[in-house]
């Protein structure tokens, strides 16, 4: 029968044959994915910079603040 070294050589040859057929396609797809990822990262960075340079002041909504329970416990003996 075959020994371990012969099986390893056969496995390497089979992988090389399959990679020869599918390798260029895999490399092309990986390159496209990398370009898309780089473009999206650049677009996110530009959008963040644009948001940071906008001169609109923050919106202030008038409302009532409610103190937390631990700050002012009830003085009339009731439970919160």
Image (cartoon, rainbow, N blue to C red):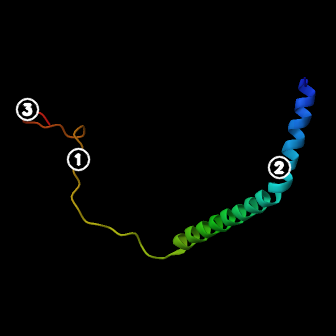
User: Dot 1: what SS?
Assistant: loop
10 Å neighbourhood of mark 2: few (<14), some, or many (≥20)?
Answer: few
At x 83%, y 50%, the residue is 19
- Per the image, the residue denoted by label 3 is 77
- Per the image, the residue denoted by label 1 is 67
At x 79%, y 58%, the residue is 27
Q: Position of residue 64 (x, y in %)?
A: 21, 58
Ranked by sequence position, the earlier of labels 3 and 1 is 1
Task: Write down the quadrant of residue 20 in the picture.
Answer: bottom right
- Per the image, the residue denoted by label 2 is 18
At x 29%, y 66%, the residue is 61
Ranked by sequence position, the earlier of labels 3 and 2 is 2
Classify residue 11 as left or right of residue 69.
right
Between 47 and 22, the residue placed more toward the observer is: 22
Name the quadrant of the C terminus. Answer: top left
User: Dot 2: what SS?
Assistant: helix
Looking at the image, residue 55 lies above or below residue 64: below
Q: Position of residue 79 (x, y in %)?
A: 12, 33
How many numbered discs? 3
Between 25 and 17, the residue placed more toward the observer is: 17
Q: Nearer the viewer, mark 3 or mark 2?
A: 2
């Amino acid at each position: 029968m075959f020994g371990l070294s012969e099986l390893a050589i056969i496995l390497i040859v089979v992988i090389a044959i399959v990679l020869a057929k599918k390798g260029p396609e895999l490399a092309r797809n990986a390159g496209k994915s990398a370009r898309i990822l780089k473009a999206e990262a650049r677009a996110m960075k530009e959008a963040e910079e644009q948001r940071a340079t906008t001169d609109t002041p923050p919106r202030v909504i008038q409302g009532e603040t409610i103190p937390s329970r631990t700050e002012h416990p009830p003085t009339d003996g009731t439970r919160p």
